Image (spheres, rainbow, N blue to C red):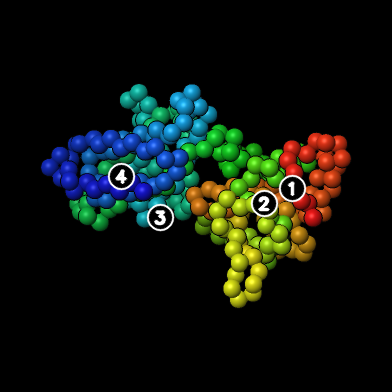
Amino acid sequence: LSSLSGLTHESHRKDVEQVYLRCSEGSIEWMYPTGALIVNLRPNTSPASYKRLTVCIKPFKDSAGANIYLEKTGELKLLVRDGDRSPSKVYCFGYDQGGLFIEATPQQDISRKITGFQYELMNKGIASDLHTVSAPCRPCSDTEVLLAVCTSDFVIRGSIQDVTNQAEEQESIIHVGVNKLYRQKSKVFQLTGESGNWRGQIKTLLECGVKPGDGDFLFTGRMHFGEARLGCAPRFKDFQRMYKEAKDKGLNPCEIGPD
């Protein structure tokens, strides 16, 4: 978390401050914004790999007091307008498209304003998985499923206990009962005290129309801003078939116990 305050620049309202961030994910919090802020993302990777990176930002729910622009060689492109209220909206752009320029908007009382957002740097392939423009709800092919098993942040066998639809955010929350945990990057799926069962939540797009139903699924996906986002999710019996066929041919990209 990088936290800054505009009050230290009260007498220089046109000041531009530079901030350098080396983490691949984190957050910026600019209290009482005045002047402008240039955010330089400098991850600890080879500069040659920068062109393969995507930057995503997710403004805080109550972020206010500044406009956020994409800046390259002096040209500004508005990314997030001050006052925009789009819950959970994520803005993504290629690392080579420019940096972030945050400019405070004129305020009568800056002490009531805080501009802030979370950010993530990721490989372009992963970013396109999370923000697929074309057919985001289509079923995965056998090859995509087997690859997802090897590369996803979480892989579980489980059932859909319930689905909560969030119309405002255009998302659905899938409440999952876990029968087998193969892998998880973060502790999204946890043992619940009252039932002694593993449970967790996975988010997906509302338009995909996920509904509670019988049977087990293989849930795969990625962590994005601290939330589990659904990737491929075939019925478990279909995954077992895919895995066995690939293993018999020596084509499975990684080993996992399918039982």
Provide residue 124's location: percent of width, then percent of height.
55, 33
Q: Secondary structure at mark 3?
A: loop
Residue 66 falls in which quadrant of the image?
top left
Quadrant of the drawing holding the C terminus: bottom right
Q: Which mark is residue 61?
A: 3
Count residues near mark 1 (Cα–Cα under 10 Å), then give few for <14, some for 14-19, many for 20+. Answer: few
Count residues near mark 4 (Cα–Cα under 10 Å), then give few for <14, some for 14-19, many for 20+. Answer: many
Q: CA distance from mark 4 to mark 1?
A: 48 Å
Q: Tell me what residue is drawn at x 27 percent, y 53 percent.
A: 113
Q: Are marks 3 and 1 in contact (CB under 8 Å)?
A: no
Residue type of the residue flagged with mark 2: Val
Q: Tell me what residue is drawn at x 19 percent, y 52 percent.
A: 108
Camera-nearest residue between 182 and 26: 182
Q: CA distance from mark 3 to mark 4?
A: 14 Å
Q: Secondary structure at mark 2?
A: strand
Q: CA distance from mark 2 to mark 4?
A: 39 Å
Query: Label 2: which residue?
Result: 155
Count residues near mark 2 (Cα–Cα under 10 Å), then give few for <14, some for 14-19, many for 20+. Answer: many
Chain-order first, disc 3 or disc 2: 3
Is 153 left or right of 121, judged from the image as shown?
Answer: right
Q: Secondary structure at mark 1?
A: loop
Q: Are marks 2 and 1 in contact (CB under 8 Å)?
A: yes
Q: CA distance from mark 3 to mark 1?
A: 39 Å
* Mark 3 vs mark 2: in front: 2
Provide residue 179's location: percent of width, then percent of height.
71, 62
Residue type of the residue flagged with mark 1: Ile
Query: Label 1: which residue?
Result: 256
The answer to whether residue 13 is above or below residue 177 is above
Chain-order first, disc 3 or disc 1: 3
Q: Are marks 3 and 4 in contact (CB under 8 Å)?
A: no
Chain-order first, disc 2 or disc 4: 4
